Amino acid sequence: MRVLLINPTMGDYYRHSKVAAAITLSPPLNLALLAGALRQAGHGVELWDLEARPVPDLRAALRASKPDMVGVSFRTPLFPQARRIAEIARQELPGALLVAGGVHPSTRPEETLLRAPFDVAVRGEGDLSVVELADGRSFEGIGGLTWRGGSTPARALIEDMDSLAMGAWDLVDLRHYERTSLVARTTPVADLEFSRGCRARCVYCTKGVFGNLWRNKSPARFVEELAHAKAHGFRAFNLVDDSFTTITSRAIASCEEMLRVDLDMPWTLTNGIRVGNVNEEFFRVARQAGCYLLAFGFESGSDQVLKRIKKGATVEQARRAVGWARKYGFTILGYFMVGLPGETAETIAETAAFAASLDLDFAKFSITMPLPGTPLYDQWAPHIRDAHKYDFSIHQPDNGLYDHPDFSWPQLEAHTRQAYQTFYGRPRYVARRLIRSLRSGQLAREARYTLGVGAGGLMESFQRR
Ligand code: B12
Ligand code: SF4
């Protein structure tokens, strides 16, 4: 079969906003993996990343490409775009199989099919399902599918991570991924994964694809993938794992293998690691192995709130982890949330003060968003406005998707602005950043982003990411 895989664009909103300063543009890992698996099985594949290479006339392009199957990947905020692609594909390619995949169809398969003309939604990991669909197997014979009028039970999570296909990076033109960012020193950057899944159960987190079972690749296979990415022209990588350090000794072993093979690829952990799943040895070895920037998902400075959101981590653990990361010279990003369940004005202020008290390089404060498929979404369902229920196109803090049970939107926004002010408004912060940029030899690049956009812009960059 001839398969076309499409990654919708996150839109002009990202491209023209100051948020671009904090976002690295990388080719879509999910579609590169699916393309690799499809090709291994003998199918022809095209991959269109509309984020990096917009297709101005999608109709004409689809007509010219004439695929037998079109697969579109999307997270919840991209649903409106995915629907538009499906509508055009339905009109131009009436005989093609239209497949929805990714986080949103995995968590909301029925609504996806109700509101967009896809033929089938793939729930969960798509590595095997996409091949079985292209092979022409009947829907009933494939696990984890939903179609109009039927569905099959979820398929088991893939445990042998070494069995996954290598990313088909030759299908993307890396010249379109050369934009540096605040977090990317060297480009192009490959998004890669060492593990899937996370054992924690944070109430706001979508687990509909990789679930709670943590699985990892062998260090040898992982390094083989790095070499594969390097051979295709990538100069750096970012690990997108839900929880890279779940078994800290395995994360260390993968870093040791990187050191042994020495591919000279700088890397980052921008998705965040858990403060409780680390030890000093991890930071020492990861730094030696080329990791220069990492993020922590702290979320709150209140142990009470952390408990309420089932974070499974404490403020004390956070301080210890930051101390180690600082000792080994990492650039450190902190992710925090505002308006979590059980939050009061006092706990938000506590979070802001906690962020300022940690020796972080950057902090991002996000207003809590209940996303489909999370316990928080179910808990706050009565507060979610019907008109917006399945259209998350304007995924911004002020979009009025829901009424927070304890705060008005202006209050949440004011608290968030205040948190940014508390963190970035410190005179010491600017002085420290300057010294660190000088020391790391990154002054020119970092100044371009931090000074270039100004303190307000920096706040906006992180606010909207
Ligand atoms: C990297 C990342 C980003 C990057 C995106 C980079 C990029 N090039 O895409 C950035 C920083 C921009 C980002 C932004 C956001 N993100 Co994000 N992000 C991730 C992260 C950490 C990794 C994504 C990834 O590469 N995973 C690895 C691949 C292999 O997994 P996958 O995409 O799920 O693909 C598998 C299956 O879904 C399926 N599949 C996927 N596509 C397709 C297509 C077909 C046809 C088929 C058959 C199967 C299939 O097969 C794949 C292989 O098994 C995930 C968490 C995670 N671990 O997945 C969160 C995650 C996707 N993000 C999330 C969120 C909430 C956001 C934001 C909304 C955050 C915000 N507040 O603004 C924005 C959304 C922006 C937007 N407009 O869409 C949520 C999504 C929740 C939801 N219901 O949609 C996730 C799941 C985190 C979480 N656990 O809650 N994100
Ligand atoms: S630690 Fe991260 S990936 Fe794991 S459940 Fe919590 S938010 Fe999700």
Image (cartoon, helix red, strand yellow):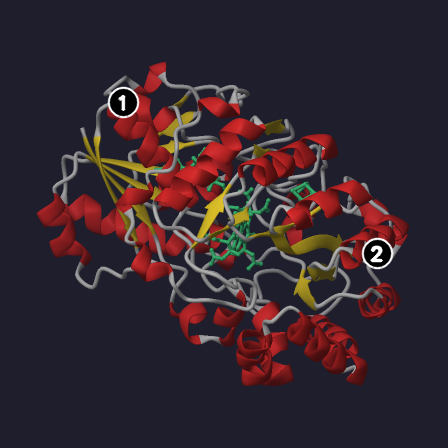
Q: Which amino acid does label 2 sit on?
A: Gly
Q: Which tag, 2 or 1, sits closer to the chain's start?
A: 1
- Disc marking residue 41: 1
Q: Which of 346 and 20 is in front in this view?
A: 20
Q: Quadrant of the C terminus?
A: bottom right
Quadrant for the N terminus, please.
top left
The residue shown at (82%, 44%) is: 313
Q: Which residue is drawn at 54% across and 42% down?
A: 262
Left or right: where 129 falls relative to 439: left
In the image, taking residue 117 as reference, residue 338 lies left or right, namely right
- Check disc 1: other Cα within 10 Å, few if <14, some if 14-19, many if 20+: few
Residue 103 x, y percent position in the rendering: 48, 41
Residue 100 figure quarter: top left
Q: Is residue 273 shown above or below 461? A: above
Q: In this view, does 26 lie to the left or right of 139?
A: right
> For the residue marked with disc 1, what is the amino acid?
Ala
Residue 189 x, y percent position in the rendering = 45, 54
Name the residue: 25% across, 26% down: 134
